[in-house]
Amino acid sequence: MDDYTESSDFLEEKEEAVVVQKKPRLSLSLKKKVPAVCTSEGVAASTPTKRHRPVLKPVNSSVCKDRYELTKSEFDYEKMCVPFVPQNTKKNNDWAYKNFVSWRNARNLLNKENPCPEDLLEQPWDVVELSYWLPRYACETRTQDGKKYPAATVYSLLGGLLRRMRSVSLDCPNFLDTKDARFRDMHAIIDTYFRELRMTGVGADVKHASLVTKEEENALWEKGVMGLDTPERLFYAVFYYNGKNLCLRGGKEHRSLKISQFVRYEDPDIYIYTENGSKNRSGGLNQMDVENKSIPVLACDKLKDRCHFQIIRKYLSKLPNKAFEMDCFYMKPLGNQVANDPDKAWFANQACGENKLANVVKTMFSKIGVTGKTNHSLRATGASDMFRAGVPEKIIQERTGHRSVKALRTYERTTSSQHKSVTEVLSSSSAVHFVEERSNPSTNSKPALCSGSECFKSVIANATDCVINVNIVPNSKSCEDNMH
């Protein structure tokens, strides 16, 4: 019994010593002096004073009910355990799987001697089978009209299959990892096939959202599509400038827009728009350091009716109280007859439908006889206009919400007038210089072609806070004469 007591005391002392070692070291001036404990054998080592636990006040059930809400059930928490997948990504995964199943069924009908396994994409995964069949799928899959997919689309299909398989289990081998030697043959086949697609011009015609020109925007105002005098015109105007100036995406960002995202301040008059999450800013543990997009919308009197601030202010003043209760920005416009009564709301107590919002820009431009425009055209136009006006990339990136400069620069588009000027530069027999005049967003930006001292004077007269590079052409007689 004594041995057990001694060993137990020894363990307690050892545990206490370990705990003491884990305490952070303090400087001598900060250490708290602890009185020594006297024993029959002398003065023992100092022992730390015991910490007293705080006395908890009795719990008030009414206070707890007001502060905390048990709104989620155990079933809700179980659903939250499923990793977050964006809606567009889920659609891509489902499309990739349906495309693969369609190819597999067709191939098994055409080649019954060597059929593709029905459970190829199911557990347990066979690396050898995946390495054999996936490159054949990549090379043989076709569109519904029998055309080859571009390389980027084929790679997206393979990525969709991989994401779907990994949603079942993370143990799925990453067959797109080029460093994985087990899929070396697969990567070699796909690489060769992608080169063939490039050499034959498949996928060379990259489609971008059609930009809105200044002439087309002016036509929307001149022909009465946009304005501040009727509910429909006001609705089109606020939708257009929200999409262009705030660089909203054409789909979910317009549908989920809320009134509470616009906060007004005075002196100066300004609205601050704050994004509530987006495609590449969805939040989560991996984006703790990513801030929400925040854009100021300032009043500009010289823009008159086209001032985005005044358009938002007028639109919000004509919304019914129901819109603020619902916290819904886009409400269904009423008939133009309500515009005669200044006290009546211009919009119904009903939010705009998803289909109506998806086709707003298409409907607007059809009224002036222009086709090919979509809601995404507004975002692309806003970013492209800022590039052409020389706005710093950092400011453009803050507007668009892009997290990488590479993705942002896809909106740096060239115009037909720029290509025409380049053609004249290359085809002219005399020395002609390409000069692009940068103008305000409210005016048309037209490239100019000039030569000699006229070109130099034109640039100097319009240049402010910029660096001018002058190229002198010795063979040009006009330039030599002007230099003398």
Image: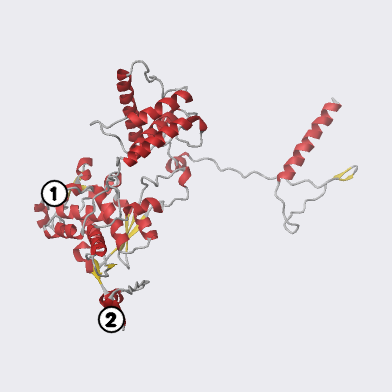
* Category of crowding for the residue at label 1, using alpha-carbon neighbours closer than 10 angstroms: few (below 14), some (14–19), many (at least 20): few
Q: Which residue is mark 2?
A: 481
Q: Earlier in the sequence, mark 1 or mark 2?
A: 1
Q: Looking at the picture, how far across and down is residue 52, in whole percent? A: 67, 45
Mark 2 element type:
helix
Residue displayed at 33% across by 29% down: 140
Q: Which residue is mark 1?
A: 366
Q: The C terminus appears in which quarter of the rendering?
A: bottom left
- Res 3 seen here: yes
Q: Looking at the picture, how far across and down is residue 401, in whole percent? A: 37, 52
Q: Nearer the viewer, mark 1 or mark 2?
A: 2
Which colour style is shown? Answer: secondary structure
Amino acid bearing label 2: Asp
* Category of crowding for the residue at label 2, using alpha-carbon neighbours closer than 10 angstroms: few (below 14), some (14–19), many (at least 20): few
Residue displayed at 29% across by 34% down: 148
Tell how many labels.
Answer: 2
Give residue 80's quadrant in the image. Answer: top left
Left or right of residue 259: residue 304:
left
Mark 1 element type:
helix
Q: Closest to the observer: 69 or 62?
A: 69
Q: Is residue 465 above or below residue 369?
A: below
Q: Closest to the observer: 297 or 389?
A: 389
Left or right of residue 317: residue 169:
right
Residues at circles 1 and 2 in contact by the CB criterion of under 8 Å: no
Residue displayed at 29% across by 76% down: 456
Amino acid bearing label 1: Ser
Q: CA distance from mark 1 to mark 2?
A: 53 Å
Q: Is residue 211 above or below residue 99?
A: below
Q: Is residue 301 above or below residue 113?
A: below
Give residue 57's quadrant in the image. Answer: top right
Q: Closest to the observer: 44 or 224?
A: 224
Q: Looking at the picture, how far across and down is residue 464, in whole percent? A: 33, 74
